[in-house]
Amino acid sequence: MSQRTAVDLNKSYLLLNHGPVTLVSSAAGARRNVMAASWAMPLDFDPPKVAVVIDRSTLTRELVEASGEFVLNIPSLRIAETVLRAGSVSGREGDKLAALKITTSPASAVGAPLVEGCLGWLECRVIPEPENQRKYDLFVAEVVAAWADPTVFSNGRWSFQEEGKRTIHYRAGGHFFATGDGFEV
């Protein structure tokens, strides 16, 4: 199981501030799913809010609309192949998490699972904005719990010392890059 420590909710925006790709996990009833999403971002500090684009044709969208919840999981470089596969296949043909051998853990405040192999987790409850959801596939949600791997995120800062424990960014066509070294100005 991934190491996790709680992140103060008013600092949870820092988990997404640098624009990493995310895995959106969802669950409703006995069904669950995961999809890759590059268009996720922090919106506010207190209460903390995020925005994510979830296409209307996806199973994830169906589950998020049914439950009103999701988790933004921030994957590591180690699971980049899984991220690509999660964004390339549909969960409508069966349990995508099982098919991709993705291990999960229960979340603390929502029904959607936490994806193992990630470096950060934002448990979210949808703030209904039907017009934005219908027109733009844009979901706004309040972050109700946040977690991070303490070996790479502490005191509100990322520190990537180990190559496999870097967040990743999707460029397109199966190409990613890993978060680089930080510097101060």
Image (cartoon, helix red, strand yellow):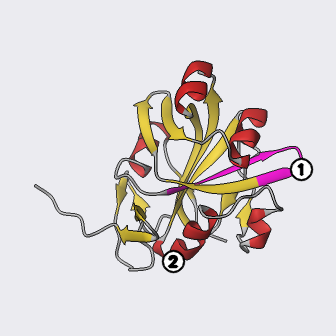
N-terminal-most mark, 1 or 2 = 1
For the stretch drawn in magenta, the main secondary structure is strand
Outermost residue on the right side: it is: 30
* Picture quadrant of residue 13: top left
Q: Nearer the viewer, residue 76 or 81?
A: 81
Classed neighbour count for the residue bearing mark 1: other residues with Cα under 10 Å, few (<14), some (14–19), many (≥20) = few
Outermost residue on the bottom side: it is: 163
Write down the residue under mark 1: 30
Write down the residue under mark 2: 78
Query: Mark 2 falls on what kind of element?
Result: helix
Residue occupying the point 63% across, 22% down: 128
Q: Quadrant of the C terminus?
A: bottom left
Q: Position of residue 19 (x, y in %)?
A: 38, 52
Position of 117 with respect to 13 (left or right) is: right
Q: Is residue 26 magenta?
A: yes
Q: Position of residue 97 (x, y in %)?
A: 74, 65
Q: Position of residue 99 (x, y in %)?
A: 77, 71
Query: Mark 1 falls on what kind of element?
Result: loop
Position of 90 with respect to 180 (left or right) is: right
- The image shows residue 145, relative to residue 178, as above or below, that is above
Residue 117 visible somewhere in the drawing:
no
Q: How many marks?
A: 2
Residue 37 visible somewhere in the drawing:
yes
Outermost residue on the left side: it is: 185
Q: Is residue 56 magenta?
A: no
Q: Amino acid at mark 2?
A: Arg
Q: Nearer the viewer, residue 70 or 175?
A: 175
Q: Quadrant of the N terminus?
A: bottom right
Q: Which residues are magenta?
A: 22-32
Inter-mark Cα distance, 1 to 2: 29 Å
Q: Amino acid at mark 1?
A: Ala
